[in-house]
Amino acid sequence: MDYVHYLEAFDKESGYLVREHRLDIDLDDLKRMLDIDPDFEVFGYPVPNSLVPEVAKYAEESVIVDESCDYFVGFFR
């Protein structure tokens, strides 16, 4: 089954989703980048601050990294 992946930005103060960017990257490649077990079924996964710019390179549109946000990758079928 195919997944659609999003880089999601959540406001640190409120916890609300404030932006999402669709990613154009294979699921296996994304799991390797984030060091996620290949067999692990994930629906949301935190992205370390150090990796946000690398993940953002695969966004379909330009991403401006906002320090007031925590970033996650959302995996949707």
Image: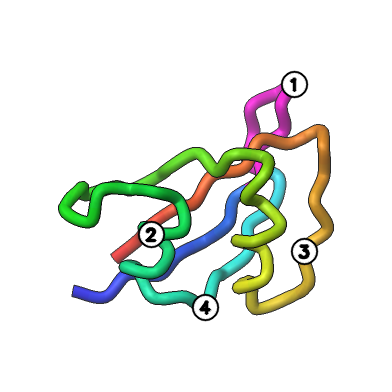
Question: Which amino acid, by three-letter code, is at mark 1?
Answer: Glu
Mark with earlier residue (4, 1) = 1
Mark with earlier residue (2, 3) = 2
Gap between marks 4 and 3 measured at Cα: 13 Å
Residue 18 higher or lower than 59, as above or below: above
Query: Magenta segment range?
Result: 9-17
What residue sits right under mark 3 in the picture? 63
Mark with earlier residue (4, 3) = 4
> Dot 1, crowdedness within 10 Å: few (<14), some or many (≥20)?
few
What residue sits right under mark 1 in the picture? 13
Residue contact at pointers 1 and 3, CB within 8 angstroms? no
Gap between marks 1 and 2 measured at Cα: 30 Å
- The picture quadrant where one finds residue 59 is bottom right
Gap between marks 2 and 3 measured at Cα: 21 Å
What residue sits right under mark 2 in the picture? 32
- Quadrant (top left/top right/bottom left/bottom right) for the C terminus: bottom left
Mark with earlier residue (1, 3) = 1
Residue contact at pointers 1 and 2, CB within 8 angstroms? no
- Disc 3 is placed on an element classified as loop
- Disc 2 is placed on an element classified as helix
Image coordinates of residue 56 in percent, x first then y, are: 67, 63
Check the image and tell me how it is coloured.
rainbow
Q: Nearer the viewer, mark 4 or mark 2?
A: 2
What residue sits right under mark 4 in the picture? 24
> Dot 4, crowdedness within 10 Å: few (<14), some or many (≥20)?
some
